[in-house]
Amino acid sequence: MATETIVYDKIKGVHKIPLEEFYTSGHRTCQGCESATTMRGFIKAAGPRTVVTGSTGCMYVANTSYMTTPWIVPWMHTQLGAGGSSAVGMAAGLRALKRKGKIKDEPINAIAFCGDLGGGDMGIGAISSALQTDYDLLIIMYDNESAANTDIQATGLSTYGAQTTFTPPGSKHRIMQRRWKKNVAAMLAVGHPTCKYIATACATFPHMDYMNKVRKAIAVGGPTFLHTYDPCPKGWDFHPRYSHEIGEMGVRSGLYPLYEIIEGKVVYTYDCREKGRSPVKDFLVAQGRFAHLIQEDFDYIQKRVDEMWEEWAIPGVAPIKGFLQA
Ligand SMILES: Cc1ncc(C[n+]2csc(CCOP(=O)(O)OP(=O)(O)O)c2C)c(N)n1
Ligand code: SF4
Ligand SMILES: [Mg+2]
């Protein structure tokens, strides 16, 4: 049984963004926090007939100071790693209440958000399970590239070379964060072929792109997933006034590919192959977390990004380079 989803219009310009706020004042996120913009944007796009769960992390802790909350819609905290399972529980609960006639049978969105550690590392199994159900739910993984809430520890999604409290540059090893960023959205798309909609987004780039992706995900029905790149002034070490520019530079450099995978087809929403790419170094030198890098590191990172766009089977998405002769 699936109640029909809410019908949404595409947001065609900034002036068409809904004025109503469902994530409002009363939070304590840092100035310039893009993850807060991600929260504000998704609930504006989804509207008031939505219930939300959020895993432990900045977007839980900073948004639920004692007796205050910025959430206007029903919201519940869930355990770190439980983004997927809480989404399923919420969607199953709504379905059961409707079936039993306890609540009106009308479309209600179930959205769960989780961080890069909570969702992309610890909670990836639960997200995988959620994507194999037939429930209407959306999971949003907000990626600030660290366990920000516990003082900026590296996660599987931290950019190569970044300084974090787990990866401090030292005199013996300049670079301690030596893994390439985990490719969560594409990995989930490849592993869950019946999932109809998986996308990446950046709330700074431009905002409507992100909000329309939220609307598309909800409207398509079934389990869906969205990965957002969220510049974090505290963890990435830049002045809060530049959050927007940093997000744009990351996307324009090709380091953070923006795409949708709709019923198995890739649609680039910022196509670096057509638009070209800005030097990755511009993005890196704008942030204190990369202050220890030297030219050979910039060259290495640039080479890896070039490879992503020029050699991957699906550029920026699938890191397979083709076949070897047996
Ligand atoms: C099972 C468990 N282990 C560790 C913690 C401590 N903890 C709370 S928030 C957090 C970091 C979460 O990182 P992320 O999901 O990326 O969200 P962010 O803080 O970056 O917003 C950690 C490790 C916890 N709450 N639960
Ligand atoms: S540490 Fe980063 S993610 Fe957390 S509230 Fe501050 S800016 Fe936002
Ligand atoms: Mg994080």
Image (cartoon, helix red, strand yellow):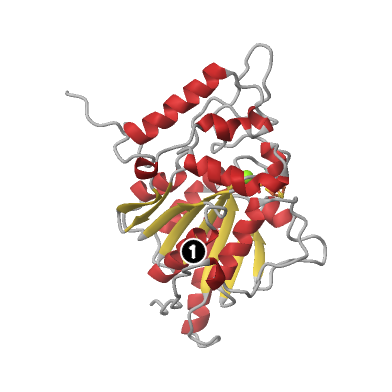
Amino acid on which disc 1 is placed:
Val
Please state the horizontal and vertical placement of residue 26, each as a whole percent of the image.
78, 64
Can you say which quadrant of the picture contains the N terminus?
A: bottom left
Please state the horizontal and vertical placement of residue 128, each as a whole percent of the image.
44, 52
- Image check: 245 left or right of 92? right
Disc 1, SS: helix
How crowded pointer 1 is (Cα within 10 Å; few <14, some 14-19, many 20+) is rated as many
**Residue appearing at x 54%, y 65% in the figure:** 111
- Image check: 231 left or right of 258? right
Q: Is any part of residue 90 visible from this angle?
A: no
Please state the horizontal and vertical placement of residue 278, each as a whole percent of the image.
48, 36
Q: Nearer the viewer, residue 198 or 95?
A: 198
Q: Nearer the viewer, residue 326 or 293?
A: 293
Q: Is any part of residue 99 visible from this angle?
A: yes
- Image check: 297 left or right of 61? left
Quadrant hosting residue 166? top right
**Residue appearing at x 63%, y 75% in the figure:** 20
Please state the horizontal and vertical placement of residue 147, each as a whole percent of the image.
65, 41
Asked if 52 appears above or below 201 in the picture, the reply is: below
Residue of label 1: 214
**Residue appearing at x 73%, y 59% in the figure:** 63
Can you say which quadrant of the picture contains the C terminus?
A: top left
Q: Nearer the viewer, residue 155 or 27?
A: 27
Q: Nearer the viewer, residue 236 or 283?
A: 283
